Image (spheres, grey):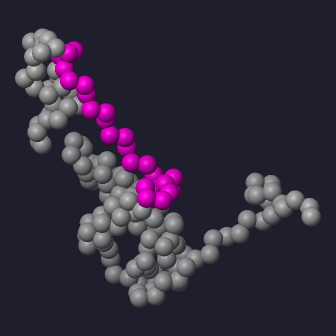
Amino acid sequence: MSTTQTEKPDVPAAGGNAPPGEKPSAGGDDAAPREKPLSPPQFILYLEGPAYANSLRQLTLWTHHVLLPVYGREITSTAPWCGRWWEHPEAVAQLHSLWLAWGELTGPGSAVVGPATWHRDYLTTAMTALRDPQGPFAGCKPGMHRPKEAPKVDAMDPFGPPPPPPA
C-alpha cells in the first residue's frame, strides 16, 4: 500500500520503533523519517572525560554482575586478580574488548553459536592474559593493589618522543 503525505502508514518504517520483540516492517517511500542507526560503541582507550567514565561504569556493571560471578575463578598466586582492576589500563582494555565481543555475540539477533564463539575465541584468551602471573595484576593480592609502572621510552628511541630542545 502506498501512503500519501496525510496518511500514516499501518506499520513502522524499517529502522523505526517497532514494539520490543517485533521486527520493523518496511514502510513506503513517504514514511516518517527513519531514526539514525546507533553507532557501535567506541573502544574505551579512545575515550576521555565523561564518555570514558560512562563506558567504564557500564563495563564495571557487566564485569561485576556477569563476568566475575560466572567466570571469576579463585584467586591464587598463579592466577591473580585485582579488586581495583579499573586502575590497570591493560585490564580495562582487555575487559572492554571482551565486553564488546559479548554484546556482539550474545545479544539479540546474534547467531545461536555466538555464545560458543565468544567462549572459544574471546573469554579464554582474555582471562588467561589477565590472570597470568606476569600479567597486569602481577603483584596484586586480595585486598592489596599494587600499581604497575609502564616501561619508560628511551629518549634515543627513533620511534619515541624527540629529545628536549637544547637550552
What is the x, y in percent for residue 53? Answer: 42, 62
Main secondary structure along the magenta-highlighted residues: loop
**Quarter occupied by residue 18:** top left
In the image, 49 versus 68, the foreground residue is 49
Q: Is residue 156 visible?
A: no
How many labels sit on residues? 0
For residue 133, side relative to residue 152 (left or right): left
Q: Is 39 contained in the magenta span?
A: yes
Q: Is residue 127 above or below residue 117?
A: below
Q: Is residue 97 above or below residue 154?
A: above
**Quarter occupied by residue 54:** bottom left
Q: Is 44 contained in the magenta span?
A: yes
In the image, 149 versus 14, the foreground residue is 14
For residue 106, side relative to residue 130 (left or right): left
What is the x, y in percent for residue 166? Answer: 92, 61
Q: Is residue 122 above or below residue 60?
A: above
What is the x, y in percent for residue 46? Answer: 51, 53
Q: Which residue is drawn at the image coordinates 40% and 79% (left, top)?
A: 83
Quadrant of the rendering where the N terminus is positioned: top left
The magenta-colored residue range is 28-52
For residue 88, side relative to residue 14 (left or right): right
Q: Which residue is drawn at the image coordinates 24% and 49% (left, top)?
A: 107
What is the x, y in percent for residue 35? Answer: 27, 32
Residue, far right: 167
Q: Which residue is drawn at the image coordinates 7% and 23% (left, top)?
A: 10
